[in-house]
Amino acid sequence: MKELVTTAWNTLAFLETTLEHDLKPGITYGSLLPLDVQALYRTVTADLAILLSNERRPASCPVDTEQAIARLHSLTRDNHHASQLPVSNDALLTWLVMTADVALMEVLVRISPWFRDSDPDPDNTQRNDQELIQILDTALITSGGVGKRREPILQLISALQKYIPQQGTSHNPRNHDVVGPVPQIHLLHPVSSWSQPSVLAFTEYIHHSANLNHRPQLHYATTQPRVITNALDHWPSLSHRPWSNIGYLRSVVGHGRMVPVEFGSQYIDPQWKQRLIPFTEFVDHILFPDSSSTHPSNNETTPTPMYDKPVAYLAQHDLFQQIPALQADISIPDYCYGLISETEDTPLEPLIHWWLGPRGTVSPLHYDRYHNLLVQVVGYKYVRLYSPLESAKLYPFTDDSNLSNTSRVDVRRSDVGQFPAFAQASYVECLLKPGEMLYIPPYWWHYVESLSVSCSLSFWF
Protein backbone atom coordinates (compact mmCIF):
# COMPACT_ATOMS: atom_id res chain seq x y z
CA MET A 1 0.00 0.00 0.00
CA LYS A 2 2.84 2.41 0.79
CA GLU A 3 4.19 2.34 -2.76
CA LEU A 4 0.72 2.85 -4.22
CA VAL A 5 0.07 5.81 -1.92
CA THR A 6 3.41 7.40 -2.83
CA THR A 7 2.82 6.84 -6.54
CA ALA A 8 -0.68 8.28 -6.32
CA TRP A 9 0.56 11.47 -4.69
CA ASN A 10 3.42 11.75 -7.21
CA THR A 11 0.88 11.37 -10.00
CA LEU A 12 -1.28 14.10 -8.49
CA ALA A 13 1.77 16.39 -8.19
CA PHE A 14 2.39 15.82 -11.90
CA LEU A 15 -1.23 16.61 -12.77
CA GLU A 16 -1.26 19.76 -10.65
CA THR A 17 1.42 21.25 -12.89
CA THR A 18 0.23 19.77 -16.18
CA LEU A 19 -1.15 23.05 -17.48
CA GLU A 20 2.33 24.57 -17.30
CA HIS A 21 4.03 21.70 -19.19
CA ASP A 22 5.56 22.62 -22.55
CA LEU A 23 4.06 20.54 -25.36
CA LYS A 24 6.14 22.44 -27.91
CA PRO A 25 8.92 24.98 -27.48
CA GLY A 26 7.29 28.04 -25.95
CA ILE A 27 3.78 26.52 -26.01
CA THR A 28 2.30 25.21 -22.77
CA TYR A 29 -0.52 22.70 -22.57
CA GLY A 30 -2.71 25.17 -20.69
CA SER A 31 -2.36 27.80 -23.43
CA LEU A 32 -4.06 25.39 -25.86
CA LEU A 33 -7.09 24.87 -23.59
CA PRO A 34 -10.15 27.12 -23.17
CA LEU A 35 -10.30 28.95 -19.83
CA ASP A 36 -13.26 26.90 -18.63
CA VAL A 37 -11.36 23.65 -19.27
CA GLN A 38 -8.32 25.02 -17.45
CA ALA A 39 -10.60 25.81 -14.51
CA LEU A 40 -12.02 22.30 -14.61
CA TYR A 41 -8.50 20.85 -14.49
CA ARG A 42 -7.70 22.89 -11.39
CA THR A 43 -10.97 21.96 -9.74
CA VAL A 44 -10.47 18.25 -10.33
CA THR A 45 -6.87 18.23 -9.05
CA ALA A 46 -7.99 20.12 -5.96
CA ASP A 47 -10.76 17.57 -5.43
CA LEU A 48 -8.24 14.75 -5.84
CA ALA A 49 -6.01 16.18 -3.12
CA ILE A 50 -8.98 15.94 -0.77
CA LEU A 51 -10.03 12.49 -1.96
CA LEU A 52 -6.54 11.04 -1.53
CA SER A 53 -6.15 12.57 1.92
CA ASN A 54 -7.18 10.78 5.11
CA GLU A 55 -8.60 14.05 6.39
CA ARG A 56 -12.30 14.76 6.28
CA ARG A 57 -13.58 16.75 3.33
CA PRO A 58 -14.49 20.33 4.34
CA ALA A 59 -18.18 21.17 4.28
CA SER A 60 -17.40 23.95 1.83
CA CYS A 61 -16.20 21.37 -0.70
CA PRO A 62 -18.95 18.74 -0.96
CA VAL A 63 -17.36 16.61 -3.70
CA ASP A 64 -17.96 12.90 -4.09
CA THR A 65 -16.30 10.32 -6.30
CA GLU A 66 -19.14 10.08 -8.79
CA GLN A 67 -19.16 13.82 -9.38
CA ALA A 68 -15.41 13.88 -9.93
CA ILE A 69 -15.51 11.01 -12.43
CA ALA A 70 -18.34 12.73 -14.33
CA ARG A 71 -16.23 15.90 -14.55
CA LEU A 72 -13.25 13.96 -15.87
CA HIS A 73 -15.22 12.19 -18.57
CA SER A 74 -16.69 15.49 -19.74
CA LEU A 75 -13.18 16.62 -20.72
CA THR A 76 -12.68 13.91 -23.32
CA ARG A 77 -16.31 13.77 -24.42
CA ASP A 78 -16.28 17.46 -25.30
CA ASN A 79 -13.08 17.03 -27.30
CA HIS A 80 -13.66 13.56 -28.72
CA HIS A 81 -14.11 14.99 -32.21
CA ALA A 82 -10.37 15.69 -32.31
CA SER A 83 -9.66 11.99 -32.74
CA GLN A 84 -12.35 11.53 -35.40
CA LEU A 85 -12.05 14.47 -37.78
CA PRO A 86 -9.22 16.20 -39.66
CA VAL A 87 -7.97 18.85 -37.23
CA SER A 88 -4.89 20.94 -36.62
CA ASN A 89 -1.85 19.28 -35.10
CA ASP A 90 -2.30 21.34 -31.92
CA ALA A 91 -5.91 20.20 -31.50
CA LEU A 92 -5.00 16.55 -31.96
CA LEU A 93 -2.03 16.84 -29.60
CA THR A 94 -4.25 18.47 -27.00
CA TRP A 95 -6.81 15.69 -27.27
CA LEU A 96 -4.11 13.01 -26.88
CA VAL A 97 -2.65 14.66 -23.78
CA MET A 98 -6.12 15.15 -22.31
CA THR A 99 -6.91 11.47 -22.88
CA ALA A 100 -3.86 10.47 -20.85
CA ASP A 101 -4.58 12.99 -18.09
CA VAL A 102 -8.20 11.95 -17.70
CA ALA A 103 -7.15 8.29 -17.35
CA LEU A 104 -4.70 9.22 -14.60
CA MET A 105 -7.32 11.34 -12.85
CA GLU A 106 -10.02 8.70 -13.09
CA VAL A 107 -7.80 5.99 -11.62
CA LEU A 108 -6.82 8.26 -8.73
CA VAL A 109 -10.50 8.91 -8.03
CA ARG A 110 -11.25 5.18 -8.15
CA ILE A 111 -8.46 4.19 -5.75
CA SER A 112 -8.93 7.07 -3.31
CA PRO A 113 -11.40 5.13 -1.06
CA TRP A 114 -8.68 2.52 -0.49
CA PHE A 115 -6.54 5.07 1.33
CA ARG A 116 -9.36 5.97 3.73
CA ASP A 117 -10.10 2.32 4.58
CA SER A 118 -9.12 1.78 8.19
CA ASP A 119 -8.60 -1.93 7.54
CA PRO A 120 -7.32 -2.39 3.96
CA ASP A 121 -8.29 -5.78 2.58
CA PRO A 122 -6.38 -6.83 -0.55
CA ASP A 123 -9.12 -9.32 -1.35
CA ASN A 124 -11.76 -6.61 -1.48
CA THR A 125 -13.62 -6.95 -4.77
CA GLN A 126 -13.27 -3.25 -5.51
CA ARG A 127 -9.51 -3.54 -5.06
CA ASN A 128 -9.44 -6.55 -7.38
CA ASP A 129 -10.73 -4.42 -10.20
CA GLN A 130 -8.10 -4.81 -12.92
CA GLU A 131 -10.12 -2.42 -15.04
CA LEU A 132 -7.94 0.30 -13.52
CA ILE A 133 -4.84 -1.05 -15.25
CA GLN A 134 -6.81 -1.43 -18.46
CA ILE A 135 -7.93 2.22 -18.29
CA LEU A 136 -4.30 3.32 -18.06
CA ASP A 137 -3.10 0.93 -20.76
CA THR A 138 -5.81 2.07 -23.14
CA ALA A 139 -4.80 5.70 -22.58
CA LEU A 140 -1.13 4.84 -23.09
CA ILE A 141 -1.83 3.05 -26.38
CA THR A 142 -4.20 5.77 -27.59
CA SER A 143 -2.06 8.75 -26.64
CA GLY A 144 1.38 7.23 -27.16
CA GLY A 145 2.37 8.76 -23.82
CA VAL A 146 2.82 12.19 -25.44
CA GLY A 147 3.69 15.21 -23.35
CA LYS A 148 5.75 13.22 -20.82
CA ARG A 149 2.68 11.17 -19.81
CA ARG A 150 4.32 7.79 -20.42
CA GLU A 151 6.29 7.59 -17.17
CA PRO A 152 3.44 8.60 -14.80
CA ILE A 153 1.15 6.05 -16.49
CA LEU A 154 3.74 3.26 -16.29
CA GLN A 155 4.57 4.05 -12.66
CA LEU A 156 0.92 3.92 -11.65
CA ILE A 157 0.41 0.65 -13.55
CA SER A 158 3.41 -0.88 -11.79
CA ALA A 159 2.14 0.16 -8.35
CA LEU A 160 -1.34 -1.20 -9.11
CA GLN A 161 0.06 -4.52 -10.36
CA LYS A 162 1.91 -4.99 -7.09
CA TYR A 163 -1.13 -4.13 -4.98
CA ILE A 164 -3.99 -5.74 -6.90
CA PRO A 165 -3.93 -9.55 -6.60
CA GLN A 166 -3.62 -11.36 -9.91
CA GLN A 167 -6.92 -12.88 -10.95
CA GLY A 168 -6.46 -16.45 -12.08
CA THR A 169 -3.49 -18.12 -13.74
CA SER A 170 -2.73 -19.32 -17.20
CA HIS A 171 -4.73 -22.32 -18.35
CA ASN A 172 -1.87 -23.35 -20.56
CA PRO A 173 1.02 -25.00 -18.71
CA ARG A 174 3.49 -24.88 -21.61
CA ASN A 175 6.51 -22.75 -20.78
CA HIS A 176 9.08 -24.30 -23.11
CA ASP A 177 9.22 -25.79 -26.62
CA VAL A 178 6.10 -23.90 -27.67
CA VAL A 179 7.00 -23.89 -31.35
CA GLY A 180 7.56 -27.44 -32.52
CA PRO A 181 9.84 -28.79 -35.26
CA VAL A 182 11.30 -26.79 -38.13
CA PRO A 183 8.76 -26.61 -41.00
CA GLN A 184 9.88 -28.50 -44.08
CA ILE A 185 9.35 -26.35 -47.16
CA HIS A 186 11.14 -26.28 -50.52
CA LEU A 187 12.47 -22.87 -51.54
CA LEU A 188 12.73 -22.31 -55.28
CA HIS A 189 14.53 -18.96 -55.10
CA PRO A 190 16.23 -18.72 -51.68
CA VAL A 191 17.54 -15.44 -50.28
CA SER A 192 21.32 -15.47 -49.86
CA SER A 193 22.55 -15.74 -46.29
CA TRP A 194 25.37 -13.78 -44.67
CA SER A 195 27.04 -14.89 -41.45
CA GLN A 196 27.65 -12.06 -38.98
CA PRO A 197 28.87 -9.33 -41.34
CA SER A 198 30.62 -6.35 -39.82
CA VAL A 199 28.69 -3.09 -39.64
CA LEU A 200 31.13 -1.63 -42.16
CA ALA A 201 30.64 -4.52 -44.60
CA PHE A 202 26.85 -4.31 -44.26
CA THR A 203 26.82 -0.54 -44.79
CA GLU A 204 29.13 -0.74 -47.79
CA TYR A 205 26.95 -3.48 -49.28
CA ILE A 206 23.91 -1.20 -49.14
CA HIS A 207 25.72 1.88 -50.46
CA HIS A 208 27.52 0.12 -53.28
CA SER A 209 24.38 -1.60 -54.54
CA ALA A 210 22.23 1.54 -54.45
CA ASN A 211 21.49 3.64 -57.51
CA LEU A 212 20.59 7.11 -56.27
CA ASN A 213 20.10 8.49 -59.77
CA HIS A 214 16.61 6.99 -59.93
CA ARG A 215 13.50 8.18 -58.10
CA PRO A 216 13.52 7.15 -54.38
CA GLN A 217 11.33 4.09 -54.95
CA LEU A 218 14.06 2.62 -57.19
CA HIS A 219 17.16 3.60 -55.24
CA TYR A 220 17.49 0.06 -53.87
CA ALA A 221 15.68 -1.86 -56.58
CA THR A 222 18.77 -3.97 -57.30
CA THR A 223 19.91 -4.25 -53.66
CA GLN A 224 19.22 -7.85 -52.76
CA PRO A 225 17.68 -8.87 -49.42
CA ARG A 226 20.00 -10.91 -47.21
CA VAL A 227 19.39 -13.30 -44.30
CA ILE A 228 21.93 -12.42 -41.60
CA THR A 229 22.89 -15.28 -39.30
CA ASN A 230 24.97 -15.69 -36.12
CA ALA A 231 24.61 -12.01 -35.17
CA LEU A 232 22.11 -12.28 -32.30
CA ASP A 233 23.65 -14.91 -30.03
CA HIS A 234 24.00 -12.32 -27.26
CA TRP A 235 20.27 -11.59 -27.06
CA PRO A 236 18.80 -12.80 -23.71
CA SER A 237 15.44 -13.34 -25.44
CA LEU A 238 17.11 -16.15 -27.40
CA SER A 239 18.98 -17.69 -24.49
CA HIS A 240 18.66 -17.29 -20.72
CA ARG A 241 15.48 -15.14 -20.81
CA PRO A 242 13.77 -16.84 -23.74
CA TRP A 243 10.58 -15.40 -25.12
CA SER A 244 9.70 -18.94 -26.21
CA ASN A 245 9.07 -19.48 -22.49
CA ILE A 246 5.56 -18.09 -22.30
CA GLY A 247 5.63 -18.24 -18.52
CA TYR A 248 8.58 -15.85 -18.55
CA LEU A 249 6.91 -13.52 -21.03
CA ARG A 250 3.74 -13.42 -18.94
CA SER A 251 5.69 -12.67 -15.78
CA VAL A 252 7.45 -9.68 -17.32
CA VAL A 253 4.29 -8.28 -18.90
CA GLY A 254 2.35 -8.77 -15.68
CA HIS A 255 -1.37 -9.09 -15.15
CA GLY A 256 -4.05 -6.75 -16.39
CA ARG A 257 -2.11 -5.36 -19.36
CA MET A 258 -3.95 -4.65 -22.62
CA VAL A 259 -2.64 -5.06 -26.16
CA PRO A 260 -4.09 -4.08 -29.57
CA VAL A 261 -4.92 -7.23 -31.52
CA GLU A 262 -5.95 -7.46 -35.17
CA PHE A 263 -8.76 -9.88 -35.97
CA GLY A 264 -8.96 -11.07 -39.56
CA SER A 265 -6.82 -13.07 -41.95
CA GLN A 266 -5.06 -9.87 -43.14
CA TYR A 267 -5.57 -6.13 -42.89
CA ILE A 268 -7.04 -5.78 -46.40
CA ASP A 269 -10.00 -8.05 -45.59
CA PRO A 270 -13.35 -6.26 -45.20
CA GLN A 271 -13.96 -8.10 -41.92
CA TRP A 272 -10.63 -6.97 -40.45
CA LYS A 273 -10.87 -5.11 -37.15
CA GLN A 274 -8.67 -4.22 -34.20
CA ARG A 275 -9.52 -4.18 -30.53
CA LEU A 276 -7.81 -4.13 -27.16
CA ILE A 277 -7.77 -7.36 -25.15
CA PRO A 278 -5.80 -8.49 -22.07
CA PHE A 279 -2.40 -9.91 -22.94
CA THR A 280 -3.12 -13.01 -20.83
CA GLU A 281 -6.25 -13.72 -22.88
CA PHE A 282 -4.25 -13.31 -26.07
CA VAL A 283 -1.73 -15.89 -24.82
CA ASP A 284 -4.20 -18.38 -23.35
CA HIS A 285 -6.96 -18.30 -25.93
CA ILE A 286 -5.25 -17.27 -29.16
CA LEU A 287 -1.60 -18.32 -29.05
CA PHE A 288 -2.20 -21.53 -27.10
CA PRO A 289 -5.90 -22.45 -26.98
CA ASP A 290 -6.64 -25.69 -25.17
CA SER A 291 -9.64 -27.58 -23.91
CA SER A 292 -9.92 -25.39 -20.81
CA SER A 293 -10.08 -22.20 -22.88
CA THR A 294 -13.78 -22.55 -23.58
CA HIS A 295 -17.08 -21.15 -22.52
CA PRO A 296 -20.48 -22.91 -22.32
CA SER A 297 -22.88 -22.63 -25.21
CA ASN A 298 -26.50 -21.71 -24.70
CA ASN A 299 -27.42 -25.21 -23.54
CA GLU A 300 -24.34 -25.22 -21.24
CA THR A 301 -23.41 -28.75 -22.27
CA THR A 302 -21.15 -28.34 -25.32
CA PRO A 303 -18.07 -26.13 -24.82
CA THR A 304 -17.08 -23.91 -27.75
CA PRO A 305 -13.78 -22.08 -28.20
CA MET A 306 -13.72 -18.44 -27.07
CA TYR A 307 -11.64 -17.47 -30.10
CA ASP A 308 -12.50 -19.65 -33.10
CA LYS A 309 -12.13 -17.32 -36.07
CA PRO A 310 -10.77 -15.12 -37.44
CA VAL A 311 -7.02 -15.29 -37.02
CA ALA A 312 -5.72 -12.81 -34.45
CA TYR A 313 -2.41 -10.97 -34.61
CA LEU A 314 -0.57 -8.57 -32.32
CA ALA A 315 0.92 -6.74 -35.29
CA GLN A 316 3.11 -3.68 -35.80
CA HIS A 317 2.86 -2.60 -32.17
CA ASP A 318 5.54 -0.96 -30.02
CA LEU A 319 5.17 -3.22 -27.00
CA PHE A 320 8.39 -1.81 -25.56
CA GLN A 321 6.59 1.48 -24.98
CA GLN A 322 4.15 -0.37 -22.74
CA ILE A 323 6.57 -2.89 -21.22
CA PRO A 324 10.02 -1.26 -21.07
CA ALA A 325 11.44 -4.21 -19.11
CA LEU A 326 11.21 -6.40 -22.22
CA GLN A 327 13.71 -4.19 -24.04
CA ALA A 328 16.43 -5.48 -21.70
CA ASP A 329 16.05 -8.84 -23.47
CA ILE A 330 17.21 -7.51 -26.84
CA SER A 331 19.63 -4.98 -28.25
CA ILE A 332 19.10 -2.82 -31.32
CA PRO A 333 21.29 -4.27 -34.10
CA ASP A 334 24.30 -2.09 -34.81
CA TYR A 335 23.48 -2.39 -38.51
CA CYS A 336 20.68 0.13 -37.93
CA TYR A 337 23.20 2.87 -37.24
CA GLY A 338 25.56 2.48 -40.17
CA LEU A 339 23.63 4.59 -42.69
CA ILE A 340 23.60 8.37 -42.92
CA SER A 341 20.07 9.85 -42.86
CA GLU A 342 18.85 9.89 -46.44
CA THR A 343 15.59 11.85 -46.21
CA GLU A 344 13.67 13.98 -43.76
CA ASP A 345 11.48 10.94 -43.05
CA THR A 346 14.43 8.82 -41.90
CA PRO A 347 13.88 8.18 -38.16
CA LEU A 348 16.56 9.40 -35.75
CA GLU A 349 16.21 6.13 -33.86
CA PRO A 350 15.02 2.80 -35.31
CA LEU A 351 11.25 2.29 -35.20
CA ILE A 352 10.64 -1.03 -33.45
CA HIS A 353 7.47 -3.08 -33.92
CA TRP A 354 6.31 -6.38 -32.45
CA TRP A 355 4.68 -9.13 -34.50
CA LEU A 356 3.28 -11.86 -32.23
CA GLY A 357 0.70 -14.44 -33.24
CA PRO A 358 -0.26 -18.05 -33.87
CA ARG A 359 0.42 -20.10 -36.96
CA GLY A 360 -1.32 -18.73 -40.04
CA THR A 361 -1.00 -15.01 -39.36
CA VAL A 362 -0.25 -13.09 -42.55
CA SER A 363 1.06 -9.70 -43.62
CA PRO A 364 -0.16 -9.29 -47.23
CA LEU A 365 2.22 -8.36 -50.01
CA HIS A 366 3.27 -4.75 -49.40
CA TYR A 367 6.29 -2.46 -49.18
CA ASP A 368 7.67 -0.01 -46.62
CA ARG A 369 9.74 3.06 -47.38
CA TYR A 370 12.37 2.31 -44.71
CA HIS A 371 15.32 -0.04 -44.52
CA ASN A 372 14.06 -2.95 -42.45
CA LEU A 373 15.68 -5.65 -40.33
CA LEU A 374 13.08 -8.32 -39.56
CA VAL A 375 14.35 -10.33 -36.59
CA GLN A 376 12.87 -13.72 -35.78
CA VAL A 377 12.85 -14.41 -32.03
CA VAL A 378 10.35 -17.27 -31.67
CA GLY A 379 9.09 -19.69 -34.30
CA TYR A 380 9.31 -19.65 -38.08
CA LYS A 381 8.13 -17.37 -40.86
CA TYR A 382 7.97 -17.70 -44.61
CA VAL A 383 8.88 -14.48 -46.43
CA ARG A 384 8.61 -13.81 -50.17
CA LEU A 385 10.11 -10.64 -51.65
CA TYR A 386 9.79 -8.77 -54.96
CA SER A 387 11.97 -5.95 -56.25
CA PRO A 388 10.34 -2.56 -56.91
CA LEU A 389 11.10 -3.26 -60.56
CA GLU A 390 8.32 -5.87 -60.45
CA SER A 391 5.67 -3.43 -59.15
CA ALA A 392 3.66 -3.34 -62.37
CA LYS A 393 3.09 -7.10 -62.09
CA LEU A 394 1.95 -6.93 -58.45
CA TYR A 395 -1.30 -4.98 -58.94
CA PRO A 396 -1.16 -2.45 -56.07
CA PHE A 397 -4.34 -0.80 -54.87
CA THR A 398 -4.89 2.40 -56.81
CA ASP A 399 -8.23 3.64 -55.46
CA ASP A 400 -7.20 3.91 -51.81
CA SER A 401 -4.20 6.04 -50.91
CA ASN A 402 -3.93 4.26 -47.55
CA LEU A 403 -3.32 0.97 -49.37
CA SER A 404 -1.19 2.20 -52.27
CA ASN A 405 1.75 0.26 -50.81
CA THR A 406 -0.25 -3.00 -50.76
CA SER A 407 -0.87 -5.54 -53.51
CA ARG A 408 -4.36 -6.78 -54.36
CA VAL A 409 -2.93 -10.24 -55.02
CA ASP A 410 -3.31 -12.96 -52.39
CA VAL A 411 0.06 -14.69 -52.64
CA ARG A 412 -1.37 -17.91 -51.18
CA ARG A 413 -4.02 -18.29 -53.87
CA SER A 414 -3.46 -15.83 -56.68
CA ASP A 415 -6.20 -15.46 -59.28
CA VAL A 416 -4.50 -15.93 -62.67
CA GLY A 417 -7.54 -14.62 -64.51
CA GLN A 418 -7.69 -11.39 -62.51
CA PHE A 419 -3.92 -10.91 -62.11
CA PRO A 420 -2.30 -12.61 -65.12
CA ALA A 421 1.10 -10.89 -64.90
CA PHE A 422 1.68 -11.87 -61.28
CA ALA A 423 2.93 -15.35 -62.18
CA GLN A 424 5.72 -13.79 -64.26
CA ALA A 425 7.04 -11.60 -61.43
CA SER A 426 10.49 -12.63 -60.20
CA TYR A 427 10.91 -13.14 -56.46
CA VAL A 428 13.19 -14.48 -53.73
CA GLU A 429 12.06 -16.25 -50.58
CA CYS A 430 13.28 -17.54 -47.24
CA LEU A 431 12.32 -19.51 -44.15
CA LEU A 432 13.27 -17.22 -41.29
CA LYS A 433 14.37 -19.10 -38.15
CA PRO A 434 14.91 -17.99 -34.53
CA GLY A 435 18.08 -15.94 -34.21
CA GLU A 436 18.08 -14.86 -37.86
CA MET A 437 17.34 -11.43 -39.30
CA LEU A 438 16.24 -10.55 -42.80
CA TYR A 439 17.38 -7.30 -44.36
CA ILE A 440 14.59 -5.86 -46.52
CA PRO A 441 15.61 -2.86 -48.66
CA PRO A 442 13.24 0.14 -48.94
CA TYR A 443 10.27 -0.28 -51.28
CA TRP A 444 10.85 -4.03 -51.69
CA TRP A 445 7.53 -5.84 -51.68
CA HIS A 446 7.27 -8.58 -49.08
CA TYR A 447 4.69 -11.16 -48.05
CA VAL A 448 5.08 -12.72 -44.57
CA GLU A 449 3.33 -15.79 -43.15
CA SER A 450 3.81 -17.43 -39.74
CA LEU A 451 4.39 -21.19 -40.01
CA SER A 452 4.19 -21.67 -36.24
CA VAL A 453 3.59 -19.63 -33.13
CA SER A 454 5.83 -16.70 -33.94
CA CYS A 455 7.36 -13.59 -32.43
CA SER A 456 9.29 -11.17 -34.62
CA LEU A 457 10.65 -7.65 -34.26
CA SER A 458 11.06 -5.23 -37.14
CA PHE A 459 13.60 -2.43 -37.00
CA TRP A 460 12.91 0.38 -39.47
CA PHE A 461 15.85 2.69 -40.03
Image (cartoon, rainbow, N blue to C red):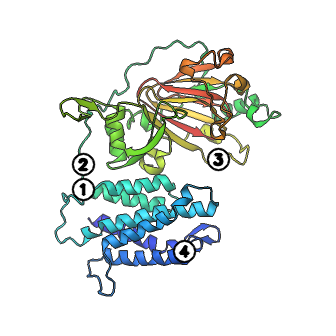
Q: Residue furthest right?
A: 213
**Are there few (<14), some (14-19), or many (20+) residues within 10 Å of tag 4?**
few
Q: Camera-side residue: 61 or 85?
A: 85
Instruction: Name the mark nearer the viewer: 1 or 4.
Output: 1
- Depicted 371 relative to depicted 85: above or below: above
Residue 191 in the image: x percent, y percent?
A: 61, 20
**Which of disc 4 and disc 1 is earlier in sequence?**
4
User: Where is mark 2, residue-wise?
Assistant: 167
**Are there few (<14), some (14-19), or many (20+) residues within 10 Å of tag 1?**
some
- From mark 1 to mark 2, how far is it between C-alphas? 8 Å
**Are there few (<14), some (14-19), or many (20+) residues within 10 Å of tag 2?**
few
Residue 229 shows in this picture: no
- Depicted 70 relative to depicted 359: above or below: below
- Disc 1 + disc 2, Cβ < 8 Å: yes
**Which of disc 1 and disc 3 is earlier in sequence?**
1
User: Where is mark 4, residue-wise?
Assistant: 20
Instruction: Name the mark nearer the viewer: 2 or 3.
Output: 2
**Which of disc 3 and disc 4 is earlier in sequence?**
4
Residue 104 shows in this picture: yes
x 45%, y 56%: residue: 139
- From mark 4 to mark 3, how far is it between C-alphas? 29 Å
User: Where is mark 1, residue-wise?
Assistant: 128
Q: Amino acid at mark 2?
A: Gln
**Which of disc 2 and disc 1 is earlier in sequence?**
1
User: Where is mark 3, residue-wise?
Assistant: 347
Q: Residue 370 sits in which quadrant?
A: top right
- From mark 2 to mark 3, how far is it between C-alphas? 40 Å
x 33%, y 42%: residue: 280
- From mark 2 to mark 4, how far is it between C-alphas? 39 Å
Q: In the image, which disc is placed on residue 65?
A: none
Quarter of the figure with the N terminus: bottom left
